[in-house]
Image (cartoon, helix red, strand yellow):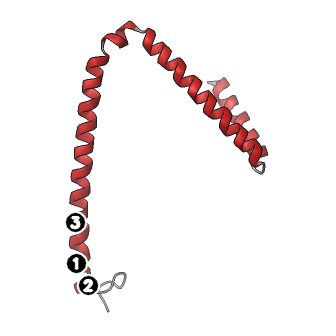
Amino acid sequence: MTTILLSLTFGIIIGFAWRNSPEKIKRANFITLIGLFFLLMVMGAQLGSNKEVLSGIGEMGKEALIIAAFSIIGSVLLVHLASKFIQKNLRRAPQEGAAGTGGKR
């Protein structure tokens, strides 16, 4: 944990020192992107070498699909209900007075 906090602190100090140098920021962004790709590759290699994970990937895929589908359905339903509620209140607002006047004109 100490190593992580020291690394983060060191990175913040470097970022603060480089904040006025677009070229250094661009280079740091590129290094971050390469590091992220490397991390994803290593994680994929670890998952690919784990027989337990590979044997259950079909079931995990089904569960992920079900969760994603219900998330989308729920989001669409809530947006639809919220838009009806907002439209209803917008239609009623002119009758109650100008917005922000507490009902007084």
Residue at the image point whose x is 76% and y is 39% from the top: 14
Which residue is the site of mark 1? 91
Which residue in the structure is indicated by mark 2? Answer: 94
- Sequence-first tag of 2 and 3: 3
Q: Which mark is residue 74?
A: none
Disc 2 is placed on an element classified as helix
Judge left or right: residue 34 versus residue 99.
Answer: right
Q: Is residue 8 above or below residue 87?
A: above
Tag on residue 85? Answer: 3
Along the viewing direction, whichever of 89 and 51 lies nearer the viewer: 51
Q: Mark 3 and mark 2 in contact (Cβ < 8 Å)?
A: no
Residue 5 lies, with reference to residue 43, above or below; the image says below
Q: Residues within 10 Å of mark 2 (few under 14, many from 20)?
A: few
The quadrant in which residue 58 appears is: top left
Percent across and percent down for residue 65 are 26, 31
Is 98 or 45 nearer to us in this picture? 45
Measured in 3D between alpha carbons, the distance from the residue under mark 3 to the one under mark 1, in whole angstroms, is: 10 Å
Mark 3 element type:
helix
Marks 2 and 1 close (CB-CB < 8 Å): yes
Task: State the residue at coordinates (32%, 92%).
Answer: 105
Question: Separation of disc 2 and disc 1 at Cα?
Answer: 7 Å
Residue 19 in the image: above or below residue 10: below
Task: Name the amino acid, label 2.
Answer: Pro
